[in-house]
Amino acid sequence: MPESVTIGFELSDDNVYAVAGYCAAEMAIEQANAKGDLPAHVKLEVIVNEKNRDVGRAAAKAFVDRKDAIAVLGPTNSATAVITQDIYAEAGILQMSSEASSPLLTNKGYTHFFRTVANDEVQGRALGQVAAKYLGAKRIAILNEDSAWGEPISKIVSDEATRLGSPPVLHYGYGAKERNLQYDDLIDAVMEAKPDLVYFAVYWNQSHIITHKLRDRGLDAVFLGSDALKPYAFLEVPSLDKEPPYHSLAGIDMMVKPSARKFLVDFAAKYPAMLDSPQYAPEAFDCAEIILECIRRAPSLDRAAVLKEAQQYGTHNGALGEIAFNAQGDLTDPDIGLYRCVNGQRIFIDLVKNLV
């Protein structure tokens, strides 16, 4: 048996949510090492991806070439995950993600990839149902960045809303890398469409600009977004007294779920500065715990043995509650919550399945 093994944390963002996920994984590993029931000391090491294909693939290849590399946690978004997923598959190394939600990641037939966040097939259908049924929108505008996350989820939302009798009046995509644009053409298109609801499949820094510009132009439509908004943009949208915006969360709000209470206490004590941004931290914590349990169960400390334990894992009880995975690596029964952003606060409404 080796004296130590390393879990790579593929950090594709430097935002507080990705960092909170790293901290949660670090805490899980420190607790397990202190407990002393692992067959070897486990280290956590950052694999820098930076959303750059060449940099990301080079970093992933360098990690899997190491003899001590036993598993990968991450990446922290879908656009980055599609860049390196095949490298980890070819290396036969266990990969778990707490944030990458694109359907593209679990429809390729890979058997090494698992995630503790809901597949966007689930979240997209839930958002389409919220728009068309719960909110009763008749003129839906969909805005998305053309990334591995933005395009698939926006299409799923569009298809579900159409199925329910509310086909979008506008579906506007734009370049994911065009972050310095003023979005004038997009804003003009939305205003011309006269929507009663705008769905955002964009990240929070982009939606912050777009929502302010739309309100400045006098649009009073309902705003609906997904968990990628994080939800800074919606909490800061001006002039929303009439129609505070909604967003979904493909996972849990650890302030709401009882199973997360111990995690919250431990996390608050160790990382008090992270409490303003705990989204995906419970998911990352459970990813790390599952990897660690696979290391405990494996008859030998090699990648194939650890991966096999993940493939036959069964049920895990952790911060997320009781979870299990299907053959594709997706959660078998994921929860999608709906929230409203009122007076700078995120208010939990209910699980979408209870609303529609």
Image (tube, rainbow, N blue to C red):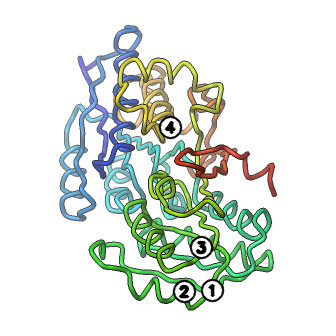
Nearer the observer, 175 or 59? 175
Residue 333 picture location, percent across and down: 69, 44
The label nearer to you, 1 versus 4, is 1
Q: Residue under label 4, please give it.
A: 283
Nearer the observer, 286 or 42? 286
Residue 340 picture location, percent across and down: 63, 52
Identify the residue shown where x is 45% and y is 18%: 266
Q: Earlier in the sequence, mark 1 or mark 4?
A: 1
Amino acid identity at mark 2 = Met
Identity of the residue furthest to the bottom in this view: 192
The label nearer to you, 3 versus 1, is 1
Q: Which mark is residue 198?
A: 3
* Element marked by disc 3: strand
* Element marked by disc 2: helix
Q: Residue under label 2, please give it.
A: 191
Q: Are marks 2 and 1 in contact (CB under 8 Å)?
A: yes
On screen, residue 332 above or below 216: above
Identify the residue shown where x is 72% and y is 62%: 130
The label nearer to you, 4 versus 3, is 3
Q: Residue under label 1, please give it.
A: 194
Amino acid identity at mark 4 = Glu
On screen, residue 234 above or below 321: below
* Element marked by disc 1: loop
